[in-house]
């Protein structure tokens, strides 16, 4: 029985420019290259997939995902094509059908990272997919995230305590970006945990673009390790590594403008954190997705995600509570909610000063320091100032304090601080001071790989429009135009 047109597949098919016959030939050719020489597809079968919602049998959905990924220059999953698990058809987005069981999380992680790496090798960084709404993610994950997590029982096939029991992979998995299932010990996990710290430091300094491929590759390897059933303590720790790497892969993807890719990594991170037993980490992953939503102009979605983040994390360390409140404040400021913004920022300050009186700060919170607290406060007040201009004074005060506290090597954050300060000055009708701070940002903005800094520079340029006839601002606007990257014609990427 058919279910009507597969709208997801139809929409993506139109983007490719292929004919139905051409897609059929490509499927047969690619399937043969992957070892499925018996597969035979024709034009009428492709028409039934698209127009009648017919579900192709394995391995066709994965072959289609590979072909669409390569053609469109962005990761396209089986779910993006409207096919769920086991070839089920339907109009589903890439993070629908939540939550995933552990085995599904491992499968999604390795398949998605494998395709992402394939795009990296080809130098493709296209966009074009849409972000799933915050409420859709929240509705899918809400009950699951707030219930106790439990790892599957250990296999009983003769495995002794401390010895990994392999979980067999299907024969075709290695052909779709999957890595070999690999057992690990505590020394390997310690090395992986150290690599996360190195990647975090690099991202904080120079932006996500330069090391994103390395992080995605490391996460792909961890997916292979998770395909083994290790002793429970080790397996949970390995899930924790996966959560850390997935958050970082998501944040780096967001930093270079790959928004749907980033969102998928944040959802993967949420699953991995829960499997690790680290409930606060699930909140941090969701808050990153919320922060992304504010950046792309969807603050209501951000608040949906923040509501879930508060519920999912259980008792949070003070510094984590402070960070979450600053993100909520930014979302509320974007909506012009003055009192809720100030209340959230006040709660952030109160939580931050409690640091050191409770549980140790987790490793993933180490980079959120007092300078970051002031920097996020400055951003929230600067955003609110477009609705309530008097907030610009608070934005200037907090941005200056953030700059005073910033340690060396946090170049990207300093650029953001300078732009928050410049924007607040423009709203306060002080274009000459704004000119000074924008120029300080311009000194280093092209030395990092963060597209977010360019987005914020464009936003600051927008605020200069009322002063376009001011001689210094007119000159500054020309310099901003020269500094901003230009589209290079490859699916919306920039050079």
Image (cartoon, rainbow, N blue to C red):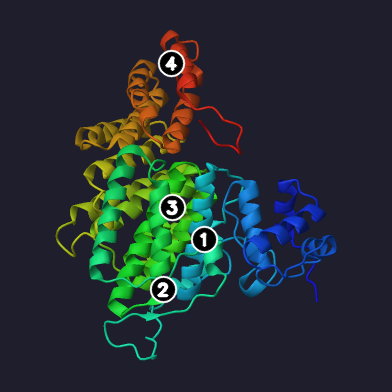
- Nearest to the eye among marks 3 and 1: give it: 1
On screen, residue 325 above or below 89? above
Please say if the residues under marks 3 and 1 sit with CB atoms less than 8 Å apart: no
| Structural distance between the alpha carbons of marks 3 and 2 | 23 Å
Q: Is residue 7 visible?
A: yes
Report crowding for label 2: few under 14, some 14 to 19, many 20 or more residues within 10 A (C-alpha). some
Q: Front-most of 98 and 298? A: 98
Q: Nearer the viewer, mark 1 or mark 2?
A: 1
Number of the label disc, if any, that sits on residue 177:
1
Q: Give the SS element for disc 3.
A: helix
N-terminal-most mark, 4 or 2: 2
- Which residue position is annotated with label 2? 146
Q: Which residue is mark 4?
A: 476
Calculate the distance from the C-alpha at mark 4 to the C-alpha at mark 1: 47 Å
Element type at marker 1? loop
Q: Is residue 166 left or right of residue 488?
A: left
- Which residue is nearer to you in this view: 57 or 130? 57
For mark 3, does the 10 Å Cα neighbourhood hold few (<14), some (14 to 19), or many (20 or more) residues?
many
Q: Badges 3 and 2: C-beta atoms under 8 Å apart?
A: no
Marks 3/4: CA–CA distance: 33 Å
Q: Nearer the viewer, mark 3 or mark 4?
A: 3
């Amino acid at each position: 029985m058919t279910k009507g047109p597969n709208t997801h597949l139809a929409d993506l098919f139109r983007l490719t420019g292929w004919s139905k016959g051409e897609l059929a030939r490509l499927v047969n050719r690619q399937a043969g290259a992957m070892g499925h020489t018996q597969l035979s597809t024709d034009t009428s079968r492709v028409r039934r997939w698209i127009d009648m919602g017919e579900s192709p049998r394995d391995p066709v959905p994965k072959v289609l995902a590979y072909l669409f990924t390569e053609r469109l220059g962005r990761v396209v999953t089986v779910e993006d094509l409207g096919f769920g698990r086991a070839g089920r058809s339907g109009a589903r987005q890439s993070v629908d059908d939540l939550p995933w069981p552990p085995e599904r999380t491992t499968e999604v992680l390795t398949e998605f990272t494998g395709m992402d790496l394939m795009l990296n090798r080809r130098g493709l960084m296209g966009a074009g997919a849409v972000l799933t709404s915050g409420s859709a993610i929240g509705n899918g994950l809400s009950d699951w995230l707030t219930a106790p997590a439990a790892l599957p029982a250990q296999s009983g096939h003769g495995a002794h305590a401390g010895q990994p029991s392999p979980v067999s992979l299907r024969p075709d998995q290695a052909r779709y970006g999957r890595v070999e299932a690999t057992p690990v010990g505590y020394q390997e996990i310690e090395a992986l945990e150290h690599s996360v710290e190195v990647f975090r430091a690099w991202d904080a300094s120079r932006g996500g673009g330069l090391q994103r491929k390395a992080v995605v590759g490391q996460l792909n390897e961890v997916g292979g390790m998770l395909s083994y059933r290790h002793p429970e303590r080790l397996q949970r720790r390995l899930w924790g590594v996966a959560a850390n790497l997935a958050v970082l892969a998501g944040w780096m993807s967001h930093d270079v403008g790959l928004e749907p890719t980033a969102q998928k990594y944040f959802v993967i991170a949420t699953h991995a954190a829960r499997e690790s037993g680290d409930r606060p980490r699930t909140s941090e992953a969701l808050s990153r997705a919320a922060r992304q939503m504010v950046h792309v102009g969807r603050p209501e979605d951000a608040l949906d995600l923040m509501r879930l983040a508060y519920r999912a994390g259980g008792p949070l360390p003070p510094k984590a509570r402070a960070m979450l409140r600053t993100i909520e404040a930014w979302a509320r400021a974007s909506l012009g909610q003055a009192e809720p913004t100030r209340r959230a920022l006040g709660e952030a300050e109160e939580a931050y000063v409690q640091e050191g009186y409770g549980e140790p700060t987790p490793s993933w919170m180490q980079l959120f320091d007092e300078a970051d607290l002031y920097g996020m406060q400055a951003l929230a007040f600067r955003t609110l100032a477009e609705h309530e201009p008097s907030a610009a004074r608070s934005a200037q005060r907090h941005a200056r304090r953030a700059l005073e506290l910033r340690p060396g090597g946090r170049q990207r954050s300093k650029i953001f601080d300078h732009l928050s300060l410049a924007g607040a000055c423009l709203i306060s009708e002080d274009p000459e001071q704004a000119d000074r701070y924008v120029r300080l940002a311009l000194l280093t903005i092209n030395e990092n790989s963060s597209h977010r800094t360019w987005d914020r520079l464009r936003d600051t340029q927008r605020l200069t429009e009322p002063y376009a006839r001011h001689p210094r601002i007119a000159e500054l606007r020309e310099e901003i135009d020269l500094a901003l990257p230009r589209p290079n014609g490859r699916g919306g990427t920039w050079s």
